[in-house]
Image: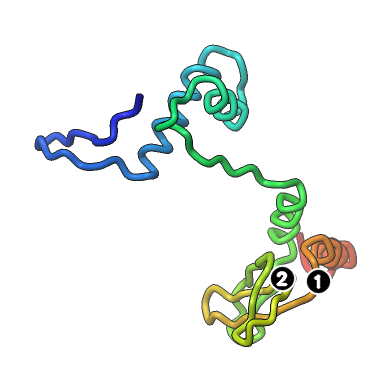
Amino acid sequence: MLPKHTLMSNNTILPLTNEAHRAMVIHKAAEKYIKTGITNNITDALRRYLDSDAGPDEQIPIFITSPLLQAIRSALRSARPTCDECRTGINLQNGATDQAGRKWLTAWICPKCHRIEYSNQSLSEWLEILKSEIRRGAVQP
């Protein structure tokens, strides 16, 4: 069972943060499944620990990235579009709603000036566009 609080060196008791709680569970999973040689993959170790060993107070969400998202991230490393206004690299968001309440499949968002370009192209379509840009040499990988 994980402690709900941590004792600091000055005898102050502080509640564990979500990050500290998550780190403790991941550490336990690594100790049980990686250091013993059962697996060398932390995601696999964490899944095994959560499925077999973790108590109810140790359950944490795990985020598995889909192959599509991994491919998009990889393509964006080579072909990230830039904002027309400030020339900062923009981020692709899956699913967006504009100020009028209209839903869009994706949106390109500038983290610097917050300019948003909405699109009805799916993540798969954007991946193909990015790959095409790389192939035709529009961007340097």
Residue visible at 84% across and 65% down? 125
Name the amino acid type tagged 1.
Answer: Gln
Residue 50 against residue 77 in the figure, above or below: above
Instruction: Decide which of 22, 71 is in the foreground and name it.
Output: 22
Disc on res. 121: 1
- Left or right of 69? Residue 16 is left
* Callouts 2 and 1 close, C-beta under 8 Å: yes
Amino acid type assigned to the residue bearing label 2 in the image: Thr
Residue that numbered label 2 is attached to = 106
Which SS class for mark 1?
loop
SS of the residue under disc 2: strand
Q: At which x and y percent is residue 78? A: 73, 60
Density class for disc 1 (Cα within 10 Å; few <14, some 14-19, many ≥20) is some
Q: Quadrant of residue 15?
A: top left
When asked about the image quadrant of residue 111, the answer is: bottom right
Name the spot of residue 114 as percent of width and height, x first.
Answer: 55, 80
Q: In percent of the image, x 50 and y 20: which residue is there? A: 53
The correct choice, above or below, for 69 with respect to 39 in the image is below
**Corner quadrant of residue 106:** bottom right
Q: Position of residue 87 (x, y in %)?
A: 62, 80
